[in-house]
Image (cartoon, rainbow, N blue to C red):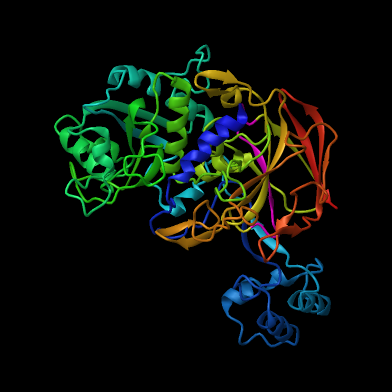
Amino acid sequence: MKCLTRTMAGLMAACITALSFAVHPLMQTSAANVPILIGYRGDINHDMKIDRTDVLLLKSYLLGDSTEMSADESSHLMNADLDDSKSLNAADLTLLKRITLHIDPLIPIYDESINSDELIPPPIRAVNPTMPCVGEAHVLMIAVSFPDAQHVLSADELQKQCFGPEDPQSPYYPQESISAFYSRASYGRLNLTGKVFSYTAKYEIDAYMQTDPRKVDYRTRDDLLDEVLEALDSVVDYKDYDLDGNGILDSVVIVLPKEAKGRDSNEDGTEDWVPCSGYYYGSAKHDGVTPAKMCIGARDPINQADFNGTWIHELGHAMGLPDYYQYLNANNQNDYQGLTGSSGWEMMDDADGDFSSFSKLMYGWFKGNEVQIYTGGTQTYELKSMQDTPNCVLIPHGVFNGFYSEYFLVEFNTPTGNYTGGFAVNNRHILFQHGGVRVMHCDAELAEGRRGTELKWRLNGKNYDISNKKQRVLRVINYNNAYFKEGMVITNETKGFAWYDENGDRTVDPGITITVSDFDENTGCKITIAPA
């Protein structure tokens, strides 16, 4: 069952071109109660590095010559008290020299004084997604029929199915409603609502896939969107779907009837209407608003859970995250699994299961005091079920320098909430029966992609390694494809528990162990992180 579901998710990748994002200035995360790197001990001129200039400044001060020292440099002098003697002396100078020679490591200074009860600003905003991921989001969904294929459900029926209230008794729970799923996933920090309209297109389905511009009847999915928006202009105020008022439609979902599935009318070797999130290349405006992207594709709405799960996944793209599954190539023609095993279920990989702590962090669904950051030594942390309580532990690679970097996230999952079950053609299947601890290996570096700033190692991005062996935005570290349980110890001998080296291979020993204790599979556990 799992392979079938993962393959379905993987088929989406086969026909989608790279999903990259428009240019946006890189954001500096200043999250509540998250230790923010503000400098290093010994950095007298406060340029975020330790070098010969700092050594000369301290040496001059110790020799009684501070005439050339600026007021700012003077204010940072005591950062050079490296021996903690409450005064500056020759021992500090020696220790500072050792740091500049890379004999001793840098000693970071963090600011932990910020109010802890604020949401972390969504790091994913750096890639300029069109749809809000925190607060209010309003989705425009249009069920498009054709002369040769009609939707079997009305707009009102789809409205109830997609944007109805939470219903734990529904046979389609936890995908009983797109709105309810996102409310649970975000701990109520995203209120996603929507409105469904219906429209019958002018031409038959295949007419909108005549993508050869040399043909007289050249017509694309952009033309379909233009036709739909123009036709509904008198009944829809598109400004209602531009919540930030930037003139760009936050999200639009074009739902095609099940008869559109399986077609390849343009004979390009890929299915025409596999659900995807892609760019709009037109320029039409309605009510002063133009689309930038659209979610579009064919799914059978009678299969309610599959239908909702598909659009939950695609709206995840509208909020900025990429797919987590693997690139399809000659060596893995049938293996799309990005996050493997029973502990690998994730909405942006499988279109089933909850979002991982990485996704929730990127979307800004954690408060500062809900992300515990390991800063060295031996530390014990409490983990609670992430399906009930927003929480995780972040282990940075070296000095924590914000969320656009490489780190591990440790989380605890239970088969409850959005992990209650998955679906294939409305048949429920168990994702996992017994939860536990999983470690996510995250690499959220940013880079300039084909269409602006993107997560550097995203699937189909400019920097992605199509062998699937090197850097990826997200990997899962697990125990025999399952969760870590009571008494288990994660070490450098645990498969996959390593940092990337300069060649992108996982070879660098993290230098720590993670021990699981006080384990209760229904509620959570404790983990102890210690130097190896």
Query: Residue 487 in the image: x percent, y percent?
Result: 85, 34
In front of the other: 430 or 373: 430
Q: Which residue sits furthest front?
A: 267
Region rendered in magenta: 386-400
Query: Residue 111 in the image: x percent, y percent?
Result: 62, 55
Does 396 lie within the magenta span? yes
Picture quadrant where residue 357 is located? top right
Picture quadrant where residue 208 is located? top left
In the image: residue 492, left or right of residue 257: right
Residue at position x 43%, y 26% from top?
Answer: 307
Picture quadrant where residue 452 is located? bottom left
In front of the other: 472 or 111: 472
Query: Residue 81 in the image: x percent, y percent?
Result: 76, 70
Please identify the dominant SS of the magenta region.
Answer: loop
Does 513 lie within the magenta span? no
Query: Residue 193 in the image: x percent, y percent?
Result: 37, 28
Query: Split into 4 quadrants, where in the image is the N terminus?
Result: top right
In the image: residue 201, left or right of residue 473: left
Residue at position x 47%, y 25% from top?
Answer: 306
In front of the other: 151 or 185: 151
Q: Which residue sits furthest top?
A: 169
Q: Is residue 96 above or below residue 32?
A: below
Observer able to see residue 134: no
In the image: residue 523, left or right of residue 160: right
In the image: residue 379, left or right of residue 504: right
Q: Is residue 203 above or below residue 247?
A: above
In front of the other: 44 or 530: 530
- Labels in figure, total: 0
Residue at position x 64%, y 71% from top?
Answer: 76
Observer able to see residue 269: yes
